[in-house]
Image (tube, grey):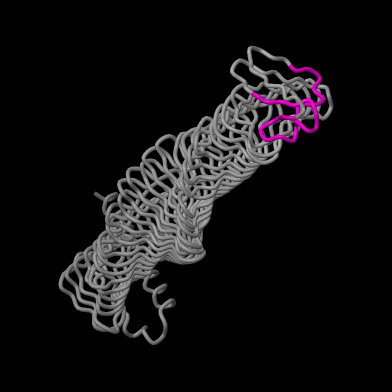
Amino acid sequence: MKFRSQNLRYGFRCFSKSIFLSRLLFVLLIPSSLVQAYTTPVTSTISGETVDSGTQFVIDGGVVGNGLVTTPATQEVLSGGIVRSSHIDGKQIVYSGGLLQANDVVGSQYVNSGGRADQSNITGRQYISAGGVVNSALINTGYQYNAGLANNTNIVGGGVQLVQSGGQAVQTVVSNGYQGVLSGGLATTTTVISGSQIISAGGVATNTTVLSGSNQNIYSGGLASGAQVVSGTQSIFAGGSATNTLIEQNGAQNVQGSVSNTVISGGSQDILAGVASFTTLNAGADQLVAGGSAVSSTLNSNSNQSILSGGVARQTILNDSNQDVGAGGQAFDTTVGSGSDQTIEGIATRNMIAQGGRQFVSAGGIANDSLLNGGSQQVLSGGLASATTVAAGNQRIELGGVASSTILGAADQVVLGRANNTVIDGGRQFIEAGGIASGNTFNAGTQQIASGGRVIDTQLVSASQFVLSGGAAENTSINSGGRQTVSLGGIATGVHLNGGRILNNGTVNELNISGSGGQAWLAAGTLAGTTIVSGTNNQLILQGGKVDGTLTIAGRDNQIDLLQTDLSGINNLRDSTGLNQLSLLNGAVISVATTADGRSRPNVLDLQNWGAINIHSSRCDLGDGR
């Protein structure tokens, strides 16, 4: 008992000494104006006490419940002190180790480093210092200034939470109010039901959820990551950034800064300035590019990309979706997949049209360097397609449309407008009524000119040209392996045969046969104008029809085969070099004369200077010179 009594007395003396030192310290630290207002520290449980002036200190072991601190009084809660369910009109301060629970703060509450406040109702001001912790605060028309840690804050009635440098706000719910994330602040998993989240320069917000009627605004230098915009709006201003955002059906993203890896599921993205990179659009989502740039967007499931004047889209991929390039807009390196359309009224460059994809070049639109790999390109009136490569698929140029420098592989080109400088490597070119094709080179493939169609300056190499009734071909060069077929009613003018073949049942004007190994066959129709046979080892077969004009034979080892062609329109069938041969085949009927007097008679041919004349079961009437 003696030992215990001594210890108790010793403990009492220590406790008394501690209280004395604590009081002395408080007196020294408190301004002189408050010294007289100093009250005894709360070291036990009290309830319902009112502090209307001075400072109340709640220290280790002190518990205050249902208290009232009026203006201008102050309540300070030190380590081990607890204040619960109190009403604070004045000032409440909690230090390291102190705890505040469910207090109603109309005035000011300060949570210092190591201090903690739970379930505060703030209609006034709450200040959280670095190292301070606040849990489940209700900011009801009040303000929270957070440089520490705030968990599960609920903002209502127009309240404001400001996350300052070093501060962190976790799982805040903005029911009706405003959360501002300032430089050095971090907000994670915020839900904005009605109100705004504002991210300023140097502020960061992650995994925010934005609901109907709400906004997330990211200003210059601010960053939002992982936001989910269900039915509100995310706005990224110049200099601001957003990454990994999900925009749902009724959500919207407005871009003037920089965004990346956005997924839009039925919602919309409006790029007014800045850059949006690696956006994915699903379920009928819309992307509007007006004044900014969209880079590497992927559109799926009937989604739409609209590029307005000043907007630029690069490396877009369309899967069952649409891209509209408006006047003044530009698209580069678009891939138009199956079930997708690209409509161009501005400029589109280096686009690939895959199987099942379509490209429409409208009035004022320009398509440069497109690649058709199974898809189609339609050039409408006023549109221009330049340097298109049609590896597979088809190109159609409507009346008033123009295609230049097309390369046509195993594909089709239909021309009702104008096609210039096309190179055909195995494909087919159809010139319909009103269509004009000029400067075309056929390395392989076919060209068909229908009634009302016209071609100019065509080169045929191992390819075929068919001039149908009513069609017209001008200045065609037929090289080795090339073939021209002129149907009844078709017209070919200025034909140069250099090793190729001609079958004429229509009209051929100004035929020039040169080179070697060429063959021209007049089966029917007319050979008009000046026909020249030169070069070597060429053959002119006059089977039927009529020669109407002049026929000049030159070169060497060329052969003229005459059957039943009407030669009444000429009287000269001479060999100008004497090195060629004339064959009169079965059915040929001609009249010739041996004297100048006889050659002057009508329908009598001058057959002078032939290297050889071969007669094969033909009838040849020789004039007697009279």
Left/right placement of residue 363 relative to residue 553 reads: left
| Residue 211, percent from left and from top | 26, 59
The one nearer the camera, 271 or 552, is: 552
Question: What residue lies at 76% left-to-right and 20% top-to-bottom?
Answer: 581
Residue 184 can be seen, yes or no: no
Q: Is 338 rendered above or below residue 146?
A: above
What count of labels does the image hold?
0
Relative to 554, 518 lies left or right: left
Name the quadrant of the C terminus: top right
Q: In the rendered view, tell whether residue 385 sits above or below residue 446.
A: below
Main secondary structure along the magenta-highlighted residues: loop
Q: Is residue 482 magenta?
A: no
Residue 381 lies left or right of residue 170; in this view the side is right
601 or 253: which is nearer to us?
A: 601
For the residue pair 506 and 269, the one nearer the viewer reads as 506
Residue at the top extreme?
A: 617
Residue 421 occupies quadrant: top right
Q: Residue furthest bottom?
A: 33
Residue at (36% x, 84% y) in the render: 34
Left or right: residue 165 versus residue 7 is right
Residue 167 on image: x %, y %? 42, 61
Is 603 a magenta residue?
yes
Residue 500: give x, y in percent of width and height: 66, 26
Q: Residue at x 33, y 43 (%)?
A: 301
Corner quadrant of residue 188: bottom left
**Residue 557 placement (x, y as % from top left):** 79, 20
Could you tell me if residue 207 is visible in this image?
yes
Q: Which residues are drawn in magenta?
A: 590-613
